[in-house]
């Protein structure tokens, strides 16, 4: 990992550049490093299941946001967006359904 110093362009930059380079901010300092290779990662059945559930929750929330009528009617909790409230509601309903089984 390379530390970025005295570079106005790269200062406080974070994120990936293609699939080759990643910029990270750690304790207020910018670092450049190689893009992580996740090809050898073996996910558990539970991780894969939650990934699928989250994808469904994301789709549900996106559909609400895209429909102006549903978006306006949706009850937002606290100071979150409609998308995040819908996402949270979907995940909570899934958790509640699984507790009953």
Image (tube, rainbow, N blue to C red):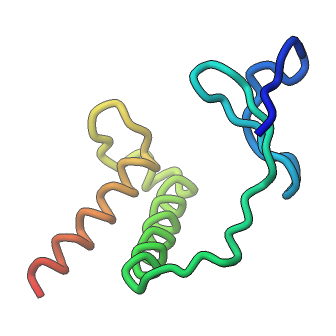
Q: Tell me if 46 is positioned left or right of 27 in this view.
A: left
Q: Tell me if 95 is positioned left or right of 8 in this view.
A: left
- Going 33% across and 55% down the picture, which residue do you hit? 88
- Going 43% across and 76% down the picture, which residue do you hit? 47
Q: Is residue 26 above or below residue 101?
A: above
Q: Is residue 80 above or below residue 20?
A: above
Q: Position of residue 42 (x, y in %)?
A: 55, 81
Indicate the quadrant containing the N terminus: top left, top right, bottom left or bottom right. Answer: top right
Q: Position of residue 17 (x, y in %)?
A: 86, 46
Q: Nearer the viewer, residue 34 or 18?
A: 34
Q: Position of residue 70 (x, y in %)?
A: 43, 55
- Going 22% across and 70% down the picture, which residue do you hit? 95
Q: Nearer the viewer, residue 49 or 28?
A: 28
Q: Nearer the viewer, residue 70 or 90?
A: 90
Indicate the quadrant containing the C terminus: top left, top right, bottom left or bottom right. Answer: bottom left
In this view, which residue lies farthest toward the left?
Answer: 100
Q: Tell me if 74 is positioned left or right of 38 in this view.
A: left
Q: Position of residue 31 (x, y in %)?
A: 75, 32
């Amino acid at each position: 990992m390379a530390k970025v110093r005295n570079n106005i362009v790269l200062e406080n930059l974070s994120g990936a550049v293609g699939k080759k380079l990643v910029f990270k901010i750690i304790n207020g300092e910018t670092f450049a490093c190689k893009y992580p290779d996740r090809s050898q990662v073996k996910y558990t059945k539970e991780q894969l299941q939650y990934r699928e559930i989250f994808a469904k929750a994301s789709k549900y929330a996106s559909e609400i946001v895209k429909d102006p009528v549903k978006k306006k009617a949706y009850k937002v909790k606290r100071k979150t967006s409609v998308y995040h409230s819908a996402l949270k509601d979907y995940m909570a309903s899934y958790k509640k359904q699984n507790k009953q089984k």
